[in-house]
Amino acid sequence: MAELYGGENIITVPPSDIERFSLRGEDAAVLEKVGLPRSGSPFFTTQVEGGPEFLRIIDVVTRDDKKHREVIIGGPPGDPGMRFSVSAYEGFVTLVQLQGTRPRGEVVNNNLTEFVEFLYQIRRHEILSAGDPAAARESLQDLSSHLKRIDPFSFERPDNWWAMVLDHLASTAGSQPA
């Protein structure tokens, strides 16, 4: 991550803070050792506007009386009504629309490792294709194939988050700044 986003742009979480999240081991390791980009693409930032803020823990009890914990890991830049969270117990990464009377969510990846891999590969595509429409189209094809192999579920519907991200990248092919 640091080689693409810059070391100063990656935020990791100390082990003492990780413990309070009660995350699955592999998700905790991602936050502690790999980290997340503070900002860098039009699709994700840890520097969210408003609340809930980065690393906020949200505990709820479901209708069937089960405990559920989400940890906020960021949001789409400029959208104070949406947050990405990781499920402490199941590991799914979800994009939640917070506005309105009933929050709505979508599972965007099966786990935090896949989510970070998606961010990494998208940033790599942005750098490889900057200012070169032909390179952008080729890189986008490779990116799409790679991401669909990692998590095909993320692309089952055209209105899924990552499918819309790829559509956006296709519509701006060759015009993204590095």
Image: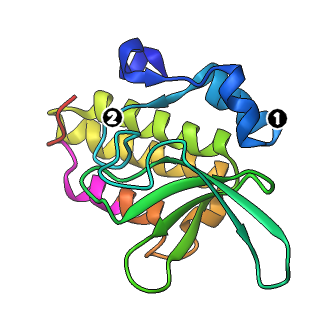
The spot of residue 104 in percent (x, y) is 51, 78
Q: Is residue 9 above or below residue 147?
A: above
Any magenta on residue 173?
Answer: yes
The residue that appears at 65% across and 51% down in the rendered structure is 149
118 sits left or right of 165 in the view: right
Residue at 71% in and 21% down: 15
**Precedes in sequence: disc 1 or disc 2:** 1
User: What's drawn in magenta, residue-wise?
Assistant: 167-174
Type of residue at label 2? Ser
Residue 106 image position (x, y, % from top left): 56, 70
State the count of labels.
2
Q: Nearer the viewer, residue 141 or 26?
A: 26
Residue at point 71% right, 41% down? 21
Q: Which residue is mark 2?
A: 39
Who is closer to the viewer here, 110 or 82?
82
**Which image quadrant is residue 14 in?**
top right
Quadrant for the C terminus, please.
top left
Indicate whether residue 143 is drawn in magenta.
Answer: no
What scheme was used to colour the molecule?
rainbow
| Residue type at numbered disc 1 | Gly
Residue 164 versus residue 52: which sits nearer the camera? 52
Q: Element type at marker 2?
A: loop
The residue carrying mark 1 is 25
Q: Using the numbered discs, state the Cα–Cα distance from disc 1 to disc 2 in whole angstroms.
A: 25 Å
- Residue 48: x and y in percent read 34, 47
Residue 11 location, x and y as percent?
Answer: 48, 24
Report crowding for label 1: few under 14, some 14 to 19, many 20 or more residues within 10 A (C-alpha).
few
The local secondary structure at tag 1 comes to helix
